């Protein structure tokens, strides 16, 4: 086999691996239509930087109308990052079956971190885990080094759900770290936007970043719109801001609105 044929063979093999990874990632990330709730409206947007990426989200319906939601961003891009998201999916699915853990966002993240660290050293990712409780009008969350989530209250006041834990994967270096949940009211008319850093780090031709401040500005300008339109406005604003700059990272946006 000459060098040209060898190169074509390697390219073909890579394309097949990439196609396999792409099909797998499509299967493990739920479609927006699968989120059906009497209490919440849901919006999602996911665009990998390449054919596959490290941005991931999932949700599970729990007892008493509660809902668990997870958004994560694995370091890196492409097949390697997609493999990590597959492991996050598997760990999250099994963790949700354990009633001792699945009611606590921080314990969910701790278990996922532990599962992945046992299989792969030096694997790092950010994540936010949520538990939505419609009966109590409460949202429990744990933010592990992820960009601030934006909570828009029904009175148009904005609150940020900031990190209360470090990036996941650091457990091996911080064995005495305390995992704890945050609690916030989440009631009729409230809206929550979560996203990965590919959104706020997107740059225009001058090297300026889209930033959390611009995201909050778009949300405030469209405060009376339903959650799906707010999400679309954020994407449009980011595209306009970037102008002709090519994408440089995966982008994932999730929105949840309490049904009024």
Image (tube, rainbow, N blue to C red):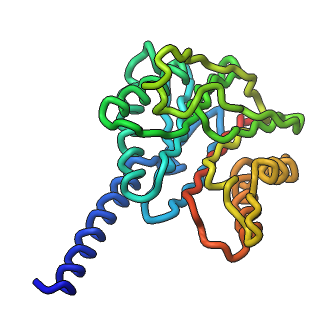
- Left or right, residue 19 beside residue 254: left
Please name the residue shown 36% across and 29% down the image.
115
**Residue 183 occupies quadrant:** top right
Q: Is 37 above or below relative to 199?
A: above
- Say whether residue 224 is visible: no
Q: Is residue 160 left or right of 169 when viewed as pictured?
A: right
| 204 versus 226 height, above or below | below
Residue 213 against residue 145 in the figure, above or below: below
Quarter of the image containing the N terminus? bottom left
Q: Position of residue 81 (x, y in %)?
A: 42, 51
Q: Looking at this view, is 230 or 245 the one in front?
A: 245
Report the residue at 40% width, 38% height from top.
Answer: 122
Residue 131 versus residue 150: which sits nearer the camera? 150
Q: Specify whether 31 is left or right of 118.
A: right
| Quadrant position of residue 22 | bottom left
Towards the viewer: 122 or 134: 122
Identify which residue is drawn at 66% across, 55% down: 199
**Image coordinates for residue 9, horizontal then vertical, percent:** 20, 77
> What count of labels does the image hold?
0
| The furthest residue to the front | 173
Q: Position of residue 182 (x, y in %)?
A: 67, 20
The reply to whether residue 231 is visible in this rendering is: yes
Please determine whether, in this image, residue 70 is positioned above or below residue 73: above
Residue at 23% from the left image edge and 73% from the top image edge: 10
Return the x and y of residue 118 as percentages of the image width and height.
32, 29
Q: Nearer the viewer, residue 181 or 203?
A: 203
**Can you say which quadrant of the picture contains the C terminus?**
top right
Figure quadrant of residue 172: top left
């Amino acid at each position: 086999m000459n060098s040209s044929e060898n190169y074509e063979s390697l390219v073909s093999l890579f394309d097949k691996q990439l196609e396999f990874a792409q099909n797998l990632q499509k299967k493990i990330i739920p479609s927006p239509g699968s989120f059906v709730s009497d209490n919440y409206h849901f919006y999602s947007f996911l665009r990998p930087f390449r054919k596959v990426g490290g941005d991931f989200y999932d949700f599970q319906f729990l007892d008493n109308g509660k809902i668990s939601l997870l958004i994560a961003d694995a370091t890196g891009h492409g097949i390697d990052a997609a493999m990590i998201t597959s492991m996050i999916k598997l760990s999250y699915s099994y963790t949700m079956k354990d009633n001792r853990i699945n009611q606590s966002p921080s314990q969910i993240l701790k278990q996922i971190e532990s599962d992945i660290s046992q299989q792969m050293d030096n694997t790092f990712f950010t994540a936010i885990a949520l538990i939505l409780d419609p009966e109590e009008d409460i949202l429990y969350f744990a933010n592990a080094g992820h960009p601030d989530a934006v909570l828009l209250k029904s009175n148009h006041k904005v609150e940020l759900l900031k990190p209360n834990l470090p990036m996941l994967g650091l457990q091996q270096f911080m064995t005495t770290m305390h995992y704890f949940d945050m609690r916030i009211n989440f009631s009729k008319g409230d809206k929550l936007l979560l996203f990965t850093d590919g959104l706020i780090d997107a740059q225009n031709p001058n090297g300026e970043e889209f930033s959390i401040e611009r995201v909050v500005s778009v949300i405030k300008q469209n405060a009376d719109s339903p959650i799906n339109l707010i999400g679309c406005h954020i994407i449009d604003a980011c595209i306009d801001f970037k102008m002709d700059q090519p994408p440089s990272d995966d982008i994932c946006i999730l929105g949840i609105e309490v049904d009024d």
